[in-house]
Amino acid sequence: MNTDELMRPLRAAVRARLGAAPGAVLAISQGNDVHIETVGSATLDGDTPLSADTVFRISSMTKPLVAALAMMLVEDGVFGPADPVERWLPELANRRVLRSLGGTDTEPAERPITVDDVLTMRMGFGFVFDEPCPTLELAARAGLGIGPPDPANPLTPDEWIARFAELPLLRQPGADWMYDLAYGVLGVLIARAAGRPLDELLHERLLAPLGMTDTGFTATDPARLIPCYQGDGTLFDPVDGSRWANRPAFPDPRGGLVATARDYLRFANLLLRGGVTADATRLLSAGSVTAMTTNRLTKPTDSFFLTAGAWGYGMEVITTEARYGWGGGLGTTWYSYPDRDLAVVLLTQCLPPPEPLVDAFWSTLHSLL
């Protein structure tokens, strides 16, 4: 099926289930064939149209882009997957680890945290949902960002890592996949190892070469940014006075980027082409792309974040369906299907993501495939 044949039923599925989301942008690419459409409106009152170039807060869809940047530094020899991060982050040397999530008693870490641990989120610190965890509560009170992205957080990268270093790890390094906080560490690691602010380096090495002119940690064109709603119809982040209007103190790789659907397809297609841009410029080696899009976990992971319990570098890997990708907590999602040279992006702006709409979109696509 071509992109037009795929788009028609997907558009119908989204229109039937908009619910808490006033509208959505749908984007598909297959080879050089790109198809972008809009459904609904940018605002709940229906007065503001969406366009193919509407700017969205893509939250955790930031992670794959920053993982790609990290792999560029690996190729440059700046750091390697097996390197201990304490070489650049001395604050994280000699870690202590909780003996139990609900307690305060600790033991020494069995080994240092490595670059691979951070990229695969096996650093030993992340979200805990199944039992009380006082240390995670301390992280929240310390302003480390346990929840939706907040570019208005005043902590600088050095302040963030210093506060994180005051806490023990929740698990031994390398033992378990734990979501999100590792990519905050990754952001500080990249900036220190490269000697450049993360946002500047990401723009220079990845965004600009790909022509991703609308992607960054700041919404430079507020006329195309849309509001982000919560499920009850109240605003999480407006356009006027948006927290994404100014450069953040800490460009947070966990979820700080804004982007358009067209821009994200450019990144998705970089991976589908094995690290080569549309104009035949190589940005990533084929080996780095394979490393990113192959399961790196050594044991199955039971987490509602992961559909199939498998994670590469910066993204979920679903081997049973030959796809990889990731979503964001403000209503965005992307998957690529390398066997079909197909990339698909769905962008809404709603916290939490409109689950009936998202489920209908992907189930419709998979029935067509």
Image (cartoon, rainbow, N blue to C red):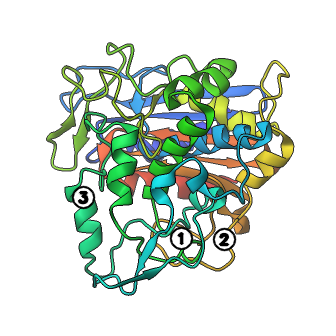
The disc label shown at residue 17, or none: none
Q: Amino acid at mark 1?
A: Trp
Q: Residue at x 66, y 41 (%)?
A: 68
Q: Amino acid at mark 3?
A: Ala
Q: Residue at x 50, y 27 (%)?
A: 199
In this orientation, does residue 97 appear? yes
Q: Amino acid at mark 2?
A: Leu
Which is more N-terminal, label 1 or label 3? 3
Q: CA distance from mark 3 to mark 1?
A: 20 Å
Tell me the residue that label 2 is attached to. Answer: 297
Q: Check disc 2: other Cα within 10 Å, few if <14, some if 14-19, many if 20+.
A: some
Judge whether 264 appears above or below 231 on screen.
above
Q: Residue at x 54, y 75 (%)?
A: 176
Q: Check disc 3: other Cα within 10 Å, few if <14, some if 14-19, many if 20+.
A: few
Numbered disc 1: secondary structure: loop
Which is more N-terminal, label 2 or label 1? 1
Mark 1 touching mark 2, by CB under 8 A?
A: yes
Tell me which corner region of the image, top left, top right, bottom left or bottom right, holds residue 242. Answer: top left
172, 215: nearer the viewer:
172
Which is more N-terminal, label 2 or label 3? 3
Q: CA distance from mark 1 to mark 2?
A: 8 Å
Give the percent coordinates (x, y) of residue 134: 24, 74
Give the percent coordinates (x, y) of residue 293: 72, 54
Tell me the residue that label 3 is attached to. Answer: 140
